[in-house]
Amino acid sequence: MSTQDPSPTQLSYLVAAIDHGGWTEAAQALGVSTSAFSQGIAELERRLGIGLFAKEGRVRVPTPEAEKAATYARNVLAELNGLGRWANDIRTGDTGRIRAGMIDTAAIYHFGETLVRFSSIHPGISVQLDVRPSAALFDELRSGALDVVVAVPPSNTDGLDLRPLVREPLYVYAPPGATVGAPDTWGPWVGFPEVSRTRALVSRELRGRGASVDVIAESSQPAVLCEMVRLGMGWTVLSAVDAEREPHVLQRAIQQPVAERALMLARRNDGPCPEALIRFMSMLIGEATASQGASDLITS
Protein backbone atom coordinates (compact mmCIF):
# COMPACT_ATOMS: atom_id res chain seq x y z
CA MET A 1 0.00 0.00 0.00
CA SER A 2 1.40 3.43 -0.97
CA THR A 3 1.34 6.38 1.47
CA GLN A 4 -1.55 7.86 -0.51
CA ASP A 5 -3.84 4.85 -0.13
CA PRO A 6 -6.45 5.21 2.62
CA SER A 7 -6.67 2.46 5.21
CA PRO A 8 -9.87 0.49 5.91
CA THR A 9 -10.00 2.14 9.34
CA GLN A 10 -9.94 5.61 7.81
CA LEU A 11 -12.66 4.64 5.34
CA SER A 12 -14.81 3.35 8.20
CA TYR A 13 -14.33 6.72 9.98
CA LEU A 14 -15.61 8.54 6.90
CA VAL A 15 -18.68 6.33 6.56
CA ALA A 16 -19.45 6.66 10.27
CA ALA A 17 -19.17 10.45 10.12
CA ILE A 18 -21.66 10.60 7.25
CA ASP A 19 -24.06 8.08 8.79
CA HIS A 20 -24.07 9.52 12.31
CA GLY A 21 -24.09 13.22 11.39
CA GLY A 22 -21.33 14.24 13.76
CA TRP A 23 -17.80 13.30 14.75
CA THR A 24 -18.56 12.80 18.41
CA GLU A 25 -21.45 10.44 17.67
CA ALA A 26 -19.40 8.61 15.03
CA ALA A 27 -16.44 8.16 17.39
CA GLN A 28 -18.73 6.78 20.09
CA ALA A 29 -20.33 4.35 17.62
CA LEU A 30 -16.89 3.06 16.63
CA GLY A 31 -15.63 2.91 20.19
CA VAL A 32 -12.71 5.32 19.69
CA SER A 33 -11.85 8.66 21.22
CA THR A 34 -12.88 11.88 19.48
CA SER A 35 -9.24 12.91 19.13
CA ALA A 36 -8.32 9.59 17.49
CA PHE A 37 -11.29 9.94 15.18
CA SER A 38 -10.28 13.51 14.26
CA GLN A 39 -6.72 12.42 13.52
CA GLY A 40 -8.01 9.56 11.34
CA ILE A 41 -10.16 11.90 9.24
CA ALA A 42 -7.28 14.38 8.92
CA GLU A 43 -4.97 11.62 7.70
CA LEU A 44 -7.62 10.44 5.22
CA GLU A 45 -7.90 13.96 3.81
CA ARG A 46 -4.13 14.15 3.54
CA ARG A 47 -3.89 10.85 1.69
CA LEU A 48 -6.70 11.70 -0.70
CA GLY A 49 -5.52 15.27 -1.16
CA ILE A 50 -9.02 16.72 -0.84
CA GLY A 51 -11.04 18.31 1.92
CA LEU A 52 -13.89 16.16 3.14
CA PHE A 53 -15.31 18.31 5.95
CA ALA A 54 -15.79 22.05 6.33
CA LYS A 55 -15.86 23.81 9.67
CA GLU A 56 -19.04 25.72 10.48
CA GLY A 57 -18.59 27.20 13.90
CA ARG A 58 -17.73 24.33 16.21
CA VAL A 59 -19.22 21.69 13.88
CA ARG A 60 -17.63 19.81 10.99
CA VAL A 61 -20.01 19.28 8.05
CA PRO A 62 -19.34 17.00 5.07
CA THR A 63 -18.50 18.52 1.70
CA PRO A 64 -20.06 17.22 -1.53
CA GLU A 65 -16.78 15.37 -2.10
CA ALA A 66 -17.23 13.59 1.23
CA GLU A 67 -20.59 12.17 0.14
CA LYS A 68 -19.05 10.78 -3.05
CA ALA A 69 -16.01 9.45 -1.21
CA ALA A 70 -18.29 7.73 1.30
CA THR A 71 -20.01 5.87 -1.53
CA TYR A 72 -16.64 4.50 -2.70
CA ALA A 73 -15.68 3.74 0.91
CA ARG A 74 -18.85 1.70 1.49
CA ASN A 75 -18.13 -0.38 -1.63
CA VAL A 76 -14.52 -0.98 -0.61
CA LEU A 77 -15.48 -1.97 2.93
CA ALA A 78 -18.17 -4.31 1.62
CA GLU A 79 -15.62 -6.03 -0.63
CA LEU A 80 -13.18 -6.35 2.25
CA ASN A 81 -15.89 -7.82 4.46
CA GLY A 82 -16.77 -10.27 1.69
CA LEU A 83 -13.11 -11.26 1.38
CA GLY A 84 -12.96 -11.86 5.12
CA ARG A 85 -16.08 -14.02 5.07
CA TRP A 86 -14.71 -16.00 2.12
CA ALA A 87 -11.40 -16.58 3.89
CA ASN A 88 -13.24 -17.65 7.03
CA ASP A 89 -15.37 -20.08 4.99
CA ILE A 90 -12.22 -21.58 3.49
CA ARG A 91 -10.64 -21.99 6.94
CA THR A 92 -13.76 -23.51 8.48
CA GLY A 93 -14.59 -25.73 5.50
CA ASP A 94 -17.83 -23.99 4.53
CA THR A 95 -16.68 -23.47 0.97
CA GLY A 96 -14.17 -24.97 -1.45
CA ARG A 97 -13.76 -27.55 -4.21
CA ILE A 98 -13.09 -31.26 -3.86
CA ARG A 99 -11.92 -33.35 -6.80
CA ALA A 100 -13.00 -36.89 -5.91
CA GLY A 101 -12.68 -40.13 -7.84
CA MET A 102 -14.59 -43.38 -7.27
CA ILE A 103 -15.08 -46.66 -8.99
CA ASP A 104 -18.66 -47.03 -10.22
CA THR A 105 -19.69 -49.46 -7.46
CA ALA A 106 -18.63 -46.96 -4.79
CA ALA A 107 -20.18 -43.95 -6.53
CA ILE A 108 -23.53 -45.62 -7.22
CA TYR A 109 -24.20 -48.19 -4.52
CA HIS A 110 -22.00 -47.52 -1.50
CA PHE A 111 -21.74 -43.73 -1.43
CA GLY A 112 -24.22 -42.33 -3.94
CA GLU A 113 -26.62 -41.14 -1.24
CA THR A 114 -23.68 -39.89 0.81
CA LEU A 115 -22.55 -37.64 -2.06
CA VAL A 116 -26.04 -36.16 -2.38
CA ARG A 117 -26.34 -35.63 1.37
CA PHE A 118 -22.91 -34.01 1.61
CA SER A 119 -23.84 -31.49 -1.10
CA SER A 120 -27.10 -30.66 0.66
CA ILE A 121 -25.36 -30.16 4.02
CA HIS A 122 -22.45 -28.18 2.52
CA PRO A 123 -23.86 -26.25 -0.47
CA GLY A 124 -20.76 -24.05 -0.57
CA ILE A 125 -18.45 -27.01 -1.25
CA SER A 126 -18.30 -28.19 -4.85
CA VAL A 127 -17.61 -31.92 -5.27
CA GLN A 128 -16.38 -32.81 -8.77
CA LEU A 129 -16.73 -36.58 -9.20
CA ASP A 130 -14.66 -38.66 -11.62
CA VAL A 131 -15.87 -42.27 -12.05
CA ARG A 132 -13.21 -44.59 -13.50
CA PRO A 133 -11.49 -47.94 -12.85
CA SER A 134 -9.15 -48.08 -9.88
CA ALA A 135 -5.88 -47.99 -11.85
CA ALA A 136 -6.88 -44.80 -13.68
CA LEU A 137 -8.06 -43.16 -10.48
CA PHE A 138 -4.79 -43.78 -8.68
CA ASP A 139 -2.85 -42.43 -11.66
CA GLU A 140 -4.94 -39.24 -11.42
CA LEU A 141 -4.42 -39.08 -7.66
CA ARG A 142 -0.64 -39.36 -7.94
CA SER A 143 -0.54 -36.70 -10.67
CA GLY A 144 -2.47 -34.27 -8.50
CA ALA A 145 -5.56 -34.19 -10.73
CA LEU A 146 -7.65 -35.69 -7.89
CA ASP A 147 -7.68 -34.90 -4.18
CA VAL A 148 -9.13 -38.19 -2.93
CA VAL A 149 -10.26 -41.52 -4.37
CA VAL A 150 -12.33 -44.51 -3.29
CA ALA A 151 -11.10 -47.59 -5.11
CA VAL A 152 -9.18 -50.85 -4.90
CA PRO A 153 -5.62 -49.84 -3.95
CA PRO A 154 -2.61 -50.63 -6.13
CA SER A 155 0.18 -52.94 -5.05
CA ASN A 156 2.51 -49.95 -4.63
CA THR A 157 1.02 -47.63 -2.02
CA ASP A 158 4.12 -45.50 -1.39
CA GLY A 159 3.24 -41.88 -0.76
CA LEU A 160 -0.44 -42.63 -0.13
CA ASP A 161 -2.55 -42.23 2.98
CA LEU A 162 -5.06 -45.12 2.95
CA ARG A 163 -8.16 -45.50 5.10
CA PRO A 164 -10.35 -48.63 5.07
CA LEU A 165 -13.93 -48.13 3.93
CA VAL A 166 -15.71 -51.20 2.56
CA ARG A 167 -15.06 -54.92 2.59
CA GLU A 168 -16.71 -56.50 -0.45
CA PRO A 169 -17.14 -60.28 -0.76
CA LEU A 170 -16.99 -61.43 -4.40
CA TYR A 171 -19.20 -64.24 -5.69
CA VAL A 172 -19.26 -66.50 -8.74
CA TYR A 173 -22.23 -66.00 -11.08
CA ALA A 174 -23.12 -68.44 -13.83
CA PRO A 175 -25.39 -67.94 -16.87
CA PRO A 176 -29.03 -69.03 -16.47
CA GLY A 177 -29.38 -72.81 -16.74
CA ALA A 178 -25.66 -73.50 -16.40
CA THR A 179 -24.63 -76.63 -14.52
CA VAL A 180 -22.48 -75.82 -11.52
CA GLY A 181 -19.96 -78.58 -11.03
CA ALA A 182 -16.43 -78.64 -9.70
CA PRO A 183 -14.36 -75.46 -10.17
CA ASP A 184 -12.46 -76.99 -13.09
CA THR A 185 -15.76 -76.99 -15.05
CA TRP A 186 -16.51 -73.29 -14.47
CA GLY A 187 -16.27 -70.79 -17.29
CA PRO A 188 -15.58 -69.40 -19.79
CA TRP A 189 -15.41 -66.01 -18.09
CA VAL A 190 -16.36 -62.42 -18.72
CA GLY A 191 -14.49 -60.02 -16.49
CA PHE A 192 -12.77 -56.74 -15.86
CA PRO A 193 -9.84 -55.67 -18.10
CA GLU A 194 -6.50 -57.32 -17.49
CA VAL A 195 -5.06 -54.21 -15.78
CA SER A 196 -7.81 -54.36 -13.16
CA ARG A 197 -6.75 -55.02 -9.56
CA THR A 198 -10.02 -56.87 -8.98
CA ARG A 199 -9.38 -59.13 -11.95
CA ALA A 200 -5.92 -60.01 -10.68
CA LEU A 201 -7.36 -60.86 -7.28
CA VAL A 202 -10.21 -62.94 -8.73
CA SER A 203 -7.96 -64.81 -11.16
CA ARG A 204 -5.56 -65.76 -8.40
CA GLU A 205 -8.35 -67.07 -6.16
CA LEU A 206 -10.08 -68.98 -8.96
CA ARG A 207 -6.87 -70.68 -10.01
CA GLY A 208 -6.24 -71.55 -6.38
CA ARG A 209 -9.53 -73.46 -6.42
CA GLY A 210 -8.58 -75.33 -9.59
CA ALA A 211 -10.60 -73.25 -12.05
CA SER A 212 -9.31 -72.34 -15.49
CA VAL A 213 -9.57 -68.59 -16.07
CA ASP A 214 -10.36 -68.26 -19.78
CA VAL A 215 -11.62 -64.68 -20.22
CA ILE A 216 -13.50 -64.28 -23.50
CA ALA A 217 -14.90 -60.77 -22.98
CA GLU A 218 -13.92 -57.76 -20.92
CA SER A 219 -15.60 -54.63 -19.57
CA SER A 220 -14.76 -52.19 -16.82
CA GLN A 221 -18.48 -51.75 -16.12
CA PRO A 222 -20.14 -54.31 -13.81
CA ALA A 223 -23.53 -53.68 -15.40
CA VAL A 224 -22.17 -54.78 -18.77
CA LEU A 225 -20.67 -57.93 -17.26
CA CYS A 226 -24.01 -58.74 -15.64
CA GLU A 227 -25.77 -58.43 -18.97
CA MET A 228 -23.19 -60.69 -20.63
CA VAL A 229 -23.83 -63.34 -17.99
CA ARG A 230 -27.60 -62.95 -18.33
CA LEU A 231 -27.29 -63.43 -22.10
CA GLY A 232 -25.28 -66.63 -21.58
CA MET A 233 -21.92 -65.37 -22.82
CA GLY A 234 -19.97 -66.54 -19.78
CA TRP A 235 -19.45 -66.67 -16.05
CA THR A 236 -18.24 -63.79 -13.89
CA VAL A 237 -17.18 -62.83 -10.38
CA LEU A 238 -18.70 -59.68 -8.88
CA SER A 239 -19.84 -58.16 -5.63
CA ALA A 240 -23.44 -58.73 -4.59
CA VAL A 241 -24.28 -55.03 -4.89
CA ASP A 242 -23.30 -55.16 -8.56
CA ALA A 243 -24.81 -58.52 -9.53
CA GLU A 244 -27.92 -58.88 -7.40
CA ARG A 245 -29.90 -55.83 -8.43
CA GLU A 246 -33.44 -55.73 -9.72
CA PRO A 247 -34.82 -56.31 -12.26
CA HIS A 248 -32.13 -58.73 -13.52
CA VAL A 249 -30.76 -60.47 -10.44
CA LEU A 250 -27.96 -62.93 -11.12
CA GLN A 251 -27.93 -66.15 -9.12
CA ARG A 252 -24.81 -67.20 -7.25
CA ALA A 253 -23.22 -70.38 -8.51
CA ILE A 254 -22.08 -71.10 -4.94
CA GLN A 255 -23.15 -69.30 -1.81
CA GLN A 256 -19.72 -68.70 -0.37
CA PRO A 257 -17.55 -65.89 -1.74
CA VAL A 258 -14.49 -66.89 -3.73
CA ALA A 259 -12.59 -63.70 -2.93
CA GLU A 260 -12.85 -60.40 -1.11
CA ARG A 261 -11.72 -56.96 -2.15
CA ALA A 262 -11.14 -53.80 -0.14
CA LEU A 263 -12.35 -50.38 -1.18
CA MET A 264 -10.04 -47.81 0.35
CA LEU A 265 -10.19 -44.06 0.82
CA ALA A 266 -6.89 -42.67 -0.44
CA ARG A 267 -5.12 -39.34 -0.71
CA ARG A 268 -1.50 -38.32 -1.23
CA ASN A 269 0.60 -37.97 1.90
CA ASP A 270 2.08 -34.71 0.61
CA GLY A 271 -1.18 -33.32 -0.74
CA PRO A 272 -3.06 -30.41 0.88
CA CYS A 273 -5.90 -31.36 3.20
CA PRO A 274 -8.15 -28.33 3.72
CA GLU A 275 -11.06 -28.43 6.13
CA ALA A 276 -13.57 -29.07 3.33
CA LEU A 277 -11.70 -32.24 2.31
CA ILE A 278 -11.48 -33.36 5.94
CA ARG A 279 -15.26 -33.01 6.26
CA PHE A 280 -15.81 -34.98 3.04
CA MET A 281 -13.54 -37.84 4.07
CA SER A 282 -15.03 -37.92 7.56
CA MET A 283 -18.53 -38.33 6.14
CA LEU A 284 -17.42 -41.21 3.89
CA ILE A 285 -15.71 -42.97 6.79
CA GLY A 286 -18.73 -42.39 9.02
CA GLU A 287 -21.13 -43.78 6.42
CA ALA A 288 -18.95 -46.85 5.86
CA THR A 289 -18.73 -47.48 9.59
CA ALA A 290 -22.48 -47.12 10.03
CA SER A 291 -23.34 -49.40 7.11
CA GLN A 292 -20.84 -52.21 7.78
CA GLY A 293 -19.99 -51.76 11.44
CA ALA A 294 -16.60 -50.92 12.84
CA SER A 295 -15.76 -54.59 13.28
CA ASP A 296 -16.26 -55.21 9.55
CA LEU A 297 -13.87 -52.49 8.42
CA ILE A 298 -10.57 -53.86 7.28
CA THR A 299 -7.45 -52.54 8.90
CA SER A 300 -4.83 -50.68 6.92
Image (tube, rainbow, N blue to C red):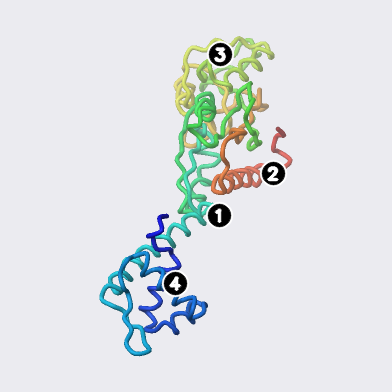
- The residue depicted at 52 percent of the width and 25 percent of the height is 139
Compare marks 1 and 3 and give the one earlier in the sequence.
1
Query: How far is the residue under mark 4 from the one under mark 1?
Result: 34 Å
Residue 281: image x %, image y %? 59, 43
In the orientation shown, which residue stands out farthest toward the left?
A: 64
Q: Which callout, 3 or 2, points to the residue nearer the camera? A: 2
| Circle 1: element type | helix
Q: Mark 2–mark 4 contact, CB under 8 Å? A: no
Specify the amino acid type for callout 4.
Gly
Residue 226: image x %, image y %? 49, 26
Compare marks 3 and 2 and give the one earlier in the sequence.
3
Compare marks 4 and 3 and give the one earlier in the sequence.
4
Q: Which callout, 2 or 4, points to the residue nearer the camera? A: 4
**Nearer-the-camera pick, 49 or 284:** 49
Q: Which residue is mark 4?
A: 40
**Nearer-the-camera pick, 33 or 248:** 33
Query: How far is the residue under mark 2 from the one under mark 1?
Result: 29 Å
Q: Mark 2–mark 1 contact, CB under 8 Å? A: no
Q: Which mark is residue 32?
A: none
Compare marks 2 and 4 and give the one earlier in the sequence.
4
Quadrant of the image containing the C terminus: top right
Q: Which residue is mark 3?
A: 187
Q: Which residue is mark 1?
A: 92
Query: How far is the residue under mark 4 from the one under mark 3?
Result: 86 Å
- The residue depicted at 71 percent of the width and 38 percent of the height is 296
Compare marks 2 and 1 and give the one earlier in the sequence.
1
Specify the amino acid type for callout 2.
Gly
- The residue depicted at 28 percent of the width and 71 percent of the height is 68
| Circle 4: element type | helix
Q: Which residue is mark 2?
A: 293
Specify the amino acid type for callout 1.
Thr
